[in-house]
Amino acid sequence: MGMIARKSGSLLAALAWAVVALAAPGARAEWLAGTVNLSDGASIRGEVYVPNDRILIQGDAQSSRYTVRTAEIARLENTIEKQSMEEKWIFKESGSDEKVYLGQYYPVRQYMTQVTFHDGNNLLGHVIGATLYVRNSDGQQRFILREKEEGKVGQKLDDLRYVRSVVFDAAGAGARGTIAGRLKLPPGEQLCAVLALNRDKLFSVEGKFNPDGDAFTVTDCTQGTYDIVIITDKAIYLDFSLEREKGAQRLDADAAKDMQAWVSALRDFFPTQTITYAAGNRERTFALVRQERRGGTTLAGLQLLFRYEVWAMARPKDQWVIEKRFFLWRSPSETEDLKPLRVVVDPALGGHAVSAQAANVTLDVQLPPQGEEAIPPHQPATEKGDVNASPAA
């Protein structure tokens, strides 16, 4: 059924140091001029490479996971968040909770990482496991960027050298911006949530809004194109802007039917999973999925549960692959009378670019009670793209 990528909720901390023999990375590696500075004062000047050209940051401010491309970064700095000497122990015997301490100590350290962009704005959080390479005339070295560093028994904290900073020669084209705006909701609807989905790097940022629901702000938006999702107590308002790109379009009834057949075959906690809107092509398709479960949960009195997610999908061969799942909203009910949320496609919500040239985006959106048809009837393939045949074929 393909590999399903799921979001991890754990906070992973950053940058421990190690040097080992390096096998040459792939031929398509992009090496950027820069300097790696170590905690002992040593500096390595050369070319720097990060596999997959990305560093993942678990941002503390939004509790969101961000993807930052290497070329976007002007400087990466690593500071000690906490450190200690831990005593080694074992369980007294199998099945026992009693610990026996051995009188042997080893160092443990965790890090906080700050990514700085060209304009001085920065993103603070924890790096999620990655690797960094640096090469110059003296050879090549590898540095492990990981959750935390644990030394060996007998080592001291001072024995743990770590990457203090990476400074790139290029200024870095990245940005940390804000998407903000005013909303006019249909009469009788209450605003429940605002999210911004970065369609390029596959992460989401949760927005804040005032109690009246007429204004919202999404901060810490790094570079990329964002589609805004507005959730009220009656509807989900969104737009997958990928459908307006060359070679992509909205899935019609036939293409959505094929995707639905694949989704229905998945084994999940939710017996019913329904594609309610999708757009894209074989390389990437975004789908709004309504999940439904009636009874059979551990929650007392719960009779019906709706859950809404956006799935980033691809179809490289003959099966779909879920690249990322974004949780949007859940609606529990103690009765079976709960109606699913309406799906309203509003192009005003999609395709908002945050960049170094335009870091802050301001919107003024009047949400319509009904929008464009989420899943239109089948139409012959157009010159715009063969999404109706390509993903489903």
Image: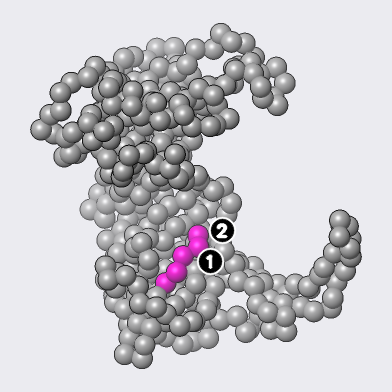
Outermost residue on the left side: it is: 383
Crowding around mark 2 (Cα neighbors within 10 Å: few <14, some 14 to 19, many 20+) is: many
Image quadrant holding the N terminus, namely: top left
The residue lying at 42 percent from left, 68 percent from top is 76
At x 30%, y 64%, the residue is: 71
Tell me, yes or no, if residue 191 can be seen here: no
Q: How many marks?
A: 2
Q: Which residues are magenta?
A: 128-132
Q: Residues within 10 Å of mark 1 (few under 14, many from 20)?
A: many
Per the image, the residue denoted by label 2 is 12
Cα gap from disc 2 to disc 1, whole angstroms: 8 Å
Is 351 displayed left or right of 84 in the figure?
Answer: left
Image quadrant in which you'd find residue 156: bottom right
Q: Quadrant of residue 184?
A: top left
* Viewer-nearest residue: 386 or 74: 386
Helix, strand or loop for the magenta stretch, by majority: strand
Q: Picture coordinates of residue 322 (x, y %)? A: 41, 41
Q: Is residue 131 magenta?
A: yes
Q: Is residue 286 magenta?
A: no
Instruction: Tell me whether circle 2 and circle 1 mark residues in contact (CB < 8 Å).
Output: yes
User: Which residue is rendered at x = 73% and y = 84% of the image?
Assistant: 154
Name the residue type under label 2: Leu
The local secondary structure at tag 2 comes to loop
Q: Is residue 336 above or below residue 351?
A: above
Q: Is residue 132 visible?
A: yes
Task: Specify which label sits upstream in the sequence, 2 or 1.
Answer: 2
Helix, strand or loop at disc 1?
loop
Kindly identify which residue carries mark 1.
Answer: 146
Name the image quarter holding residue 123: bottom left
Which residue of the protein is positioned furthest toward the top in this rendering? 337
